[in-house]
Amino acid sequence: MPTVKVKTKTRKRAAQPRTDKHHWTRKFSDRPSVWSPYVEGVTQSMLKAWRSCPETARLAYVEGFSPIATTMALEFGTCFHWCLGEIYKKPSLRYNKLRELYKDYEKVWFGERPSRMVTKKDRELLEQVIGLVATVLPIYLEVWEGDFKPNARVKDIVSPDAWVGLEQHFKVPFEIDGVAIPLQGKWDGVFKDSKGDLWLFETKTKAYIDDDLIGETLQYDLQVMLYLTAVELHFSKFPKGVVYNVVRRPGHRQSKTESLADFHFRVQKDVADPSRWDHYFKRWQMRISTKELVAWQETVLRPLLRALKHWWDTGENHWLNDDALVTKYGRSNYYDLLVHQTNTGFYRRKVAFNELEDFQS
């Protein structure tokens, strides 16, 4: 019957590799995508998003949607990383110049957002975040003072003899099936130890820290292993491992009768107590052998990229993962787009990876 022939024909066409940058017909597909695996490549965040839910990844990276709303956890991590990166690049900033650093971050924060998108609530959150960072950062610099002194050792953790990459963007090609898919990201740091061996330095801010869990699973962490792969490709030398630097975000709550200044003072007293330093500041040194890194690339990274490439080329294996709608962290940032098909509360980026915007061509 003609109808059967038409259906069969359509099915065959859909199975052919696609050369355009838009494979999926959705309500929001009204412009060329901002991402391609062969141009922008992948970041660890993009790979995790796609692995969790292809439809969320499509909205976030192919369509370029970003939620306007933010969270304390995200803003604290972003602010702390930014300030720490500036200090590691210019250590003199840690001497009586931290107030200026916080003001510079405010300028950067407002510069990244159209004024019409910044609400009173956003401003209040920014004030809270900078206040919390100001309570934690000076103590961090005291605890890990050895980072700024060649060959200084702290708690038996290998320390930098020379930094070879600080807050450095990387974009390195990873060959797969005859094509190159760039790996993109930004290292917190890469350093050489006193023996000239390379180490990745990776900082995380967390509200909850499980020492045993982190120690046992670090060698499987996608971000850490992808960054170690990038170190190998960029420097043409296998790294010895990673120094995983974890800072606990204070979990204190401001009472209704407490001013913001009093709240920050209370937090500062707790963080500044030397008996609490092991609670707030932790590090793990993990060695990775060449064999282990290559095995991860072959059993995890390469299969992931091969599946992602097939998804992009054919439009197949696309679905919405309902388990990603609500997780232990709450609703997905893309919940309203996924469930209600509304883009209210979102803006559309012109680049795939906004955290790397300054580096993308």
Image (cartoon, rainbow, N blue to C red):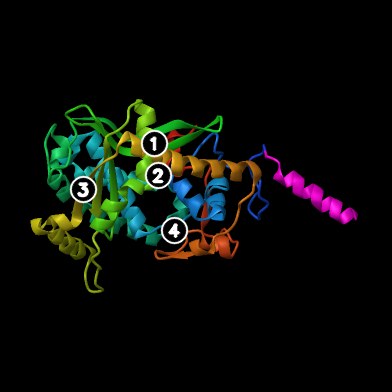
* First-in-chain label (2 vs 3): 2
Give the residues drawn in magenta, as a range. Answer: 1-18
Q: Say whether marks 4 and 1 touch (CB < 8 Å).
A: no
221 horizontally vs 66: left or right = left
In 3D space, how far apart are the residues under numbered discs 4 and 3 (Cα atoms)? 31 Å
**Which residue is under mark 2?**
111
* First-in-chain label (2 vs 1): 2
Mark 3 is surrounded, within 10 Å at the Cα level, by few (under 14), some (14 to 19) or many (20 or more) other residues, namely: some
In 3D space, how far apart are the residues under numbered discs 2 and 4 (Cα atoms)? 16 Å
Element marked by disc 4:
loop
Mark 1 is surrounded, within 10 Å at the Cα level, by few (under 14), some (14 to 19) or many (20 or more) other residues, namely: some
Label 1 amino acid?
A: Val
Q: Position of residue 224 (x, y in %)?
A: 34, 43
Where, quadrant-wise, is the N terminus in this rendering? bottom right
Q: Is residue 2 magenta?
A: yes
User: Can you see residue 115?
Assistant: yes
Q: Nearer the viewer, mark 4 or mark 1?
A: 1
Mark 2 is surrounded, within 10 Å at the Cα level, by few (under 14), some (14 to 19) or many (20 or more) other residues, namely: few
User: Can you see residue 22?
Assistant: no
**Which residue is under mark 3?**
283
* 21 and 286: which is toward the camera: 286
Q: Nearer the viewer, mark 4 or mark 3?
A: 3
Report the disc number at residue 294. 1
Q: Main secondary structure of the magenta part?
A: helix
**314 versus 344 height, above or below:** above
Q: Position of residue 226 (x, y in %)?
A: 39, 40
**Which residue is under mark 4?**
69
* First-in-chain label (1 vs 3): 3
* First-in-chain label (2 vs 4): 4
Label 4 amino acid?
A: Ala
